[in-house]
């Protein structure tokens, strides 16, 4: 199922909540691809985040879950997601907020 971002009948948050996002799977994770595109992350492979991307994306999390974290590159997001440091719910919550705004 798909949705258009300008369709007033569709709730982007509810659609993103249902998006496929298997924990640890970075080979096929649409929310990471959307975060890279809409969040302006550097899509290069620079592990230190140095690149020509935007200012980064901050994912808000509770203190029990490690607190807020800021990413500047896709490789940083992928590394944390693969290791389990970034939960699928936190990732999907962030990208749905970015897309709805």
Image (cartoon, rainbow, N blue to C red):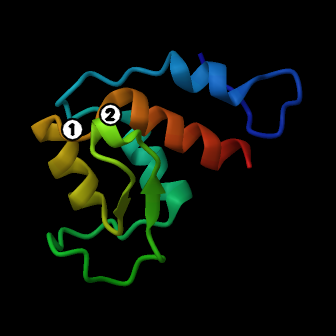
Residue situated in front as seen by the camera: 82 or 87: 87
35 relative to 81 in the view: left or right: right
**Place of residue 12 in the rendered image (x, y in percent of width and height, measured from the top left):** 68, 29
Q: Residue furthest front?
A: 63
In the rendered structure, are the residues bearing label 1 and label 2 in contact, judged by CB atoms less than 8 Å apart?
yes
Name the disc covering residue 26, or none. 1
Identify the residue at horizontal 30%, vertical 82% (top origin).
51
**Place of residue 89 in the rendered image (x, y in percent of width and height, measured from the top left):** 41, 27
14 relative to 91 in the view: left or right: right
16 relative to 5 in the view: left or right: left
- CA gap between label 1 and label 2 equals 6 Å
Q: Residue furthest left?
A: 83
**Place of residue 75 in the rendered image (x, y in percent of width and height, measured from the top left):** 21, 59
Instruction: Tell me the crowding category of disc 2: few under 14, some 14 to 19, or many 20 or more residues within 10 angstroms, Cα based.
Output: some
Q: Is residue 88 visible?
A: yes
Residue 29 quadrant: top left
Residue 26 quadrant: top left
- Name the residue beneath numbered marker 2: 29
Q: Quadrant of the N terminus?
A: top right
Identify the residue at horizontal 27%, vertical 32% (top origin).
28
Q: Is residue 2 visible?
A: no
**Place of residue 76 in the rendered image (x, y in percent of width and height, measured from the top left):** 22, 59
Identify the residue at horizontal 44%, vertical 69% (top origin).
56
Instruction: Tell me the crowding category of disc 1: few under 14, some 14 to 19, or many 20 or more residues within 10 angstroms, Cα based.
Output: some
The vertical placement of 16 against 100, above or below, is: above
């Amino acid at each position: 199922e798909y949705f258009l971002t300008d369709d007033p009948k569709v709730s982007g948050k509810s659609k993103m909540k249902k998006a496929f996002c298997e924990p640890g799977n970075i080979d096929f994770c649409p929310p990471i691809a959307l975060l890279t595109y809409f969040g302006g992350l550097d899509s290069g492979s620079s592990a230190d985040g140095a690149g020509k991307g935007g200012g980064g994306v901050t994912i808000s999390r509770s203190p029990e879950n490690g607190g807020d974290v800021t990413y500047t590159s896709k490789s940083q997001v992928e590394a944390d997601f693969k290791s389990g440091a970034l939960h699928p719910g936190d990732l999907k919550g962030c990208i749905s907020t970015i897309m709805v705004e």
